[in-house]
Image (cartoon, grey):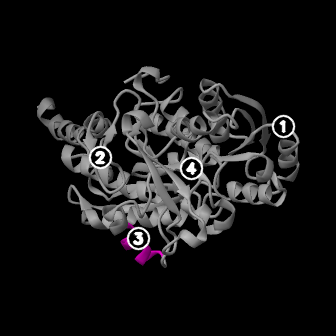
């Protein structure tokens, strides 16, 4: 009888216990698929990424149909304000709140901070905007891919070309003192030394607080070096190049612009005319690139996209295709699907998700910035001189410094 009387209580205990063992489907499995565009909305990199990067990602989602695995796709914006630690906090909160992919990260300190969080949370990060080759080098990890360009690719093209000339052997560098500038200096120094050149001196300036470069430029002008290397980006490149012209530095030195975007030339076309640079994409390269750029321009008041903004669309689309193929947003399964996969689209020609270090390789382009009189339509500043094949554009796998742990 006692056993019989205890049955209702025992049954209740079993029911309560089983409710914890088999919970209902998580919101993360049935709610929206979320992409966070982690970008600079108001700082030095806003024009080359920023709102345009968000819009390009939204275009990718719309073209995909707005849904994947029966779930709606949402695009959120995180303004990183060029602050690595704060970005890590924001992205950790986003991942905890159901974000599946972090994209863009146009700032190398931000990219490295977000990559660490992605590894911690087992979520994917695709770096399109940041340049430091450390992302797939010493700081590589299973959950982070580097998609657009990097400092190694820029140095081996622009740096090697200039240093191979007799009047391009001695260099003086102006360097943004954070992860991107530091890695740019290291990669350019290696590239020019291999061509018999020498980095005579590097002036490191505090990133994000400097707009007056006059003292650095005068020191460079008086140094006797043949080449001034500008190892910065965005508004810093625009300001330092403008002041270099004002002080006549270009009259006595070659100016090597390590990284230049279409938006920079839009801001000061006369200043950058004649510059030879390397880019990962150009909107007027061929019909396929132009067709996408026309659609982008229609949404962005006639502006043409930078290579970063184009790469955001491409990367988001490639990730969504992978999610659809594996049937889940699970980062480990998506990563296993992507590793070694080859692809081509309007942005990446000869693309491959390299498994060794998560460097996404594709063609790169050497271009000249045209003077106004040679420009046939608005924003058509570049003339493509050379196409660098994927296998030569980026660091060879045999030279990789990535200590692969996956």
Q: Is the magenta stretch mostly helix, strand or loop?
A: helix
Q: Which residue is drawn at 69% across and 62% down?
A: 271
Q: Could you tell whether 285 is left or right of 136 in the image?
A: left
Give the labeled residue for mark 2. 329
Considering depth in this image, is 261 or 110 the residue closer to the camera?
A: 261
Q: Residue lying farthest front?
A: 166
Give the labeled residue for mark 1. 224
Q: Nearer the viewer, mark 4 or mark 2?
A: 4
Q: Are marks 3 and 4 in contact (CB under 8 Å)?
A: no
Considering depth in this image, is 348 or 1 the residue closer to the camera?
A: 348
- For the C terminus, the image quarter is top left
Q: Which residue is drawn at 58% across and 72% down?
A: 373
Of pointers 3 and 4, the one earlier in the residue sequence: 4
Which element type, helix, strand or loop, lies under badge 4? strand
User: In the rendered image, which quarter is residue 147 located in?
Assistant: top left
Give the labeled residue for mark 3. 296
3D distance between C-alphas at marks 4 and 2:
37 Å
Residue 124 placed where, x, y %?
Answer: 40, 42
Residue 289 placed where, x, y %?
Answer: 36, 62
């Amino acid at each position: 009888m006692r056993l019989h009387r205890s049955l209702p209580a025992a049954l209740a205990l079993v029911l309560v216990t089983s409710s914890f063992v088999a919970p209902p489907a998580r919101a993360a499995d049935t709610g929206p698929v979320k992409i966070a565009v982690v970008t600079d909305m108001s700082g030095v990199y806003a024009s080359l990424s920023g709102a345009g990067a968000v819009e390009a990602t939204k275009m990718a989602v719309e073209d995909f149909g707005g849904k994947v695995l029966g779930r709606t796709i949402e695009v959120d914006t995180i303004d990183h304000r060029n602050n690595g630690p704060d970005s890590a906090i924001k992205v950790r909160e986003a991942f905890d709140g159901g974000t599946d992919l972090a994209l863009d990260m146009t700032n190398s300190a931000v990219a490295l901070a977000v990559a660490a969080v992605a590894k911690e949370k087992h979520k994917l990060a695709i770096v399109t905007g940041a340049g430091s080759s450390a992302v797939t080098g010493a700081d590589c990890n299973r959950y982070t891919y580097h998609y657009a360009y990097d400092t190694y690719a820029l140095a081996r093209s622009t740096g090697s070309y200039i240093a191979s000339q007799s009047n391009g052997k001695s260099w003086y560098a102006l360097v943004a003192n954070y992860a991107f500038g530091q890695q740019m200096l290291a990669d350019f120094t290696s590239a020019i030394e291999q061509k018999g050149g020498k980095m005579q001196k590097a002036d490191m300036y505090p990133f994000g607080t400097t707009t007056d470069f006059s003292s650095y430029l005068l020191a460079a002008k008086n140094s006797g070096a043949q080449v001034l290397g500008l190892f910065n980006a965005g508004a810093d490149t625009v300001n330092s190049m403008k002041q270099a012209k004002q002080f006549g530095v270009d009259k006595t030195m070659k100016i090597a612009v390590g990284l230049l975007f279409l938006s920079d030339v839009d801001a000061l076309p006369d200043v950058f005319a004649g510059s030879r640079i390397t880019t990962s994409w150009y909107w007027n390269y061929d019909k396929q690139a132009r067709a996408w750029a026309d659609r982008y321009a229609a949404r962005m008041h006639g502006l043409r996209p930078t290579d970063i903004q184009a790469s955001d669309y491409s990367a988001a689309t490639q990730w969504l295709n992978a999610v659809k193929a594996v049937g889940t947003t699970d980062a480990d399964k998506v990563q296993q699907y992507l590793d070694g996969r080859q692809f081509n689209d309007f942005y990446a020609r000869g693309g491959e998700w390299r498994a060794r270090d998560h460097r996404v390789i594709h063609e790169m382009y050497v271009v000249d910035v045209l003077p106004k009189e040679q420009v046939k339509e608005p924003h058509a500043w570049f003339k493509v001189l050379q196409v660098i094949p994927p296998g030569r554009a980026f660091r060879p796998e045999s030279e990789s410094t990535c200590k692969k742990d996956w």
